[in-house]
Amino acid sequence: MIVPVRYELKHICKQSGARLGLVHTPHGSFPTPAFMPVGTQATVKGMSPDEIKSMGAGIVLSNTYHLWMRPGSELIREAGGLHRFMNWDRAILTDSGGFQVFSLGDLRHITEEGVGFKSHIDGSRHVLTPEKSIQVQNDLGSDIIMAFDECTPWPAERDYAQRSLERTTRWLERCITTHQRPSDQALFGIVQGSTYPDLRQQSAREITSFDLPGYALGGLSVGEPGELMYQILEETVPLLPADKPRYLMGVGSPDYLIQGSIRGIDMFDCVLPTRMGRNGSVMTSRGRLIARDAKCARDFGPLDPACSCYVCQNYSRAYIRHLIKADEMLGLRLTSWHNLHFLLNLMEQVRAAIAADRLLDFRDEFFDGYGYDVPARSAVI
């Protein structure tokens, strides 16, 4: 059987145990640990594919729920698939749509069959099942597709978390049965179990009992303290196969990216860089900067003097603040551009630190500059 996605281990950091690797896909390979920019509706908000490529991204994420609702997966299939539709010739991962429908709150109802919900667009009623999620993703033609899972909120009662993870396992079986393109689309399973270590272990055993090309950890970074997430990673990641990619879903802050890499995670995604950018906020090597603030009005320096991105090489804080205050769309495009570059460059630095066997040193240096609380991080590795 052809395996469409394959993990290649390159190096293990002697200082931290973090791993450097390559993930090979039908649309090229990308180095790991990697941050995946999120293109929810077949676009990374405000950015062109060429701009995302210029920052070094080898993979982006798109969303099954949103593309199913609009314009419809059949239309994208008719267009030749998602790669051709959005003019992106590198790897694409699509999530299952589960997180989005579970986020609808009172607009959705969970049963063993799937999740009934009202569309956020027009209020029309739909049912998203494991079968439908896989069918839509088969239409989209992404390189990596995600199993339909129940994303447990935090906090969650133990009994509910156990029922939820067991349902996720049953839904995975249905996803595998439905999957029609195993030769060119890799189906990843998702480990659930909330913040209960024994339930995470149970879920990891059940999900990895299916021989899949990769595995993800879901239901984390949903409000729980960072130290609790790190504990769950330390107790769960070693249960995932070492020869397969490991994906931590929905994580994108600099501290989580570094700490997750230390704990053996290969892939991350989050809307954080573009969401912050649309709010006029940016990440810099010295911490967060609110570019719309009055203190930037006469600051003719770059957003981050240590940054080599197109934005920092060509525009000042004063100019970007002017654009934002004048409601010019370029302003928020530039802040989004910088944030995406910042995280993609951060992961490049993480990979270099792994190769040099000094990731823990790099973490401490970065955290000191960024302004993270030293006592908080002394409680973890």
Image (cartoon, rainbow, N blue to C red):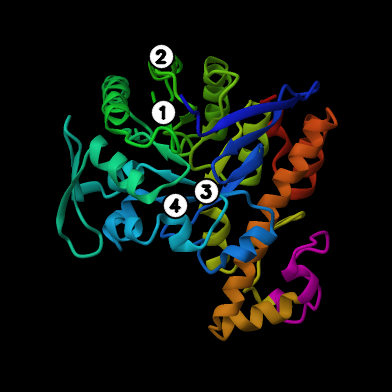
What is the CA distance from the residue labelled 1 to the residue labelled 3? 19 Å
According to the picture, the residue beneath numbered tag 1 turns out to be 189
Indicate the position of residue 353 as horizontal and vertical percent values.
80, 35
Which of the two labelled residues, at mark 2 and mark 3, occupies the earlier sequence position?
A: 2
Q: Quadrant of residue 32?
A: top right
Question: In the image, what residue type sits under mark 4?
Answer: Ser
Q: Are marks 4 and 1 in contact (CB under 8 Å)?
A: no
According to the picture, the residue beneath numbered tag 2 turns out to be 209
Q: What type of secondary structure mainly makes up the magenta span? A: loop
Of the numbered discs in the image, which one, if any, rests on residue 233?
Answer: none
Between 147 and 124, the one lying in front of the other is: 147
Residue under the image location 83 percent in, 30 percent down: 358
- Up the image or down, 328 lies above or below 200; here it is below
Indicate the position of residue 153 as horizontal and vertical percent values.
35, 36
Label 3, secondary structure: give it: strand
Between 92 and 128, the one lying in front of the other is: 92
Quadrant location, the N terminus? top left
- Is residue 301 shown in magenta? yes
Which of the two labelled residues, at mark 4 and mark 1, occupies the earlier sequence position?
A: 4
- Up the image or down, 230 lies above or below 311; here it is above
What is the CA distance from the residue labelled 3 to the residue labelled 4? 11 Å
Is residue 339 at all visible to an observer of this figure? yes
Residue under the image location 19 percent in, 51 percent down: 107
| Label 3 neighbour load within 10 Å: few <14, some 14-19, many 20+ | some
Which of the two labelled residues, at mark 1 and mark 3, occupies the earlier sequence position?
A: 1
Q: Which residues are magenta?
A: 295-314
Give the residue at the far left of this rendering: 125
What is the CA distance from the residue labelled 4 to the residue labelled 2? 27 Å
Is residue 289 at all visible to an observer of this figure? no
